[in-house]
Amino acid sequence: MLAVRDIHTYYGDSYIIQGVSLDVVPGQIAVLMGRNGAGKTTTIRSIIGLTPPRRGSVTYNGEELTRLPTHEIASRGIGLVPQGRRIFASLTVREHLAAATNHRRKETWTLERIFEVFPRLGERLNQRAVHLSGGEQSMLAIARALRTEPECLLMDEPTEGLAPLFVDIVLGVVQGLRRSGRLGILIVVHELPIALAIADHVYVMGKGRMVFDGLPHELGQQRDIQERFIGVGV
């Protein structure tokens, strides 16, 4: 579905992503891990076109994306849950979901279906986002992305800063999306137990490069990778 091949991304003269490759497969969850500053968010931004790579290739269903603007990439069926959620404080839940509607694709994520997955959002439909809890804002960020009717979903630390109850809710939703069999998911997480529990495939980054590319049980056996590039046991 999504193939990233040897991308190189810069911020000005700073060389951030140094030849990263990864794949996202329909019906599977790919987890991207690494310490702060490893390049995870820049990788997501490179894929979605916010910080286009200077070299390398990003293809989606065989189509080259690297020269397309972000809104065109999104219209192809790639959704984004950005780091920090990026909720508009002054907009209501209803307004967020209305603004995200993708009129170029068949509507499958109706409001009714959204509220089946996230009942809390239905209860707070007319509340402004500023009055939502962190967990509710995370739900809204995911629901907003689903309203764009994605076939591939990029999620940048959707559980960051959440209470355990909301972490469980978000991860339950992510695993439920995988079970649909059609949606491919690339999710950035910090916690190794979460990664090992939800991933079909795991990528670990260190200083702009991929240092591990394999199955969850293989990462579970790589103590050196865990300590050096994730921070487990440090």
Image (tube, rainbow, N blue to C red):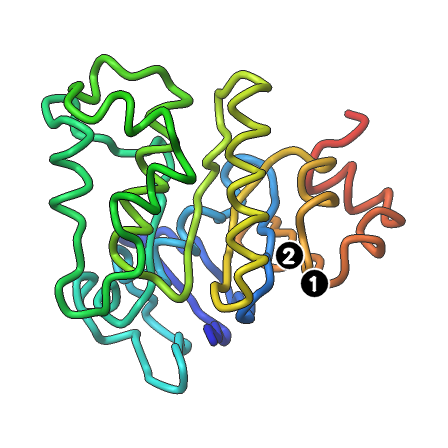
Q: Is residue 218 left or right of residue 143?
A: right
Q: Secondary structure at mark 1?
A: strand
- Could you say which is closer to the camera, residue 38 or residue 113? 113
Assess disc 1: are there few (<14), some (14-19) or many (≥20) residues with their C-alpha within 10 Å of its C-alpha: some
The quadrant in which the C terminus is found is top right
Q: Residue at x 67, y 52 (%)?
A: 199
On the image, which quarter does residue 75 sit in? bottom left
Q: Is residue 52 above or below residue 44?
A: below
Residue 191 seen in the figure = yes
Residue 168 is situated, as x and y percent measured from the top left of the image, at 59, 29
Please give the label number shown on residue 64.
none
Q: How far across and down, in percent of the image, does residue 132 sit?
A: 29, 17
The one of 220 and 17 positioned closer to us in this rendering: 220
Does residue 222 appear to the left or right of 134 in the view shown? Answer: right
Give residue 49's position: percent from left, percent from top: 27, 62
Q: Which residue is mark 1?
A: 213
Pointer 2 with pointer 1, Cβ within 8 A: yes
**Is 225 situated above or below 59?**
above
- Residue 93 position in % (x across, y down): 20, 30
Residue 54 vs residue 43, the one in the foreground: 43
Count the numbered circles shown.
2
Instruction: Name which of mark 2 and mark 1 comes first in the sequence.
Output: 2
Q: Which residue is mark 2?
A: 203
Residue kind at label 1, given as amino acid type: Asp
Which residue sits at x=71%, y=58%?
212
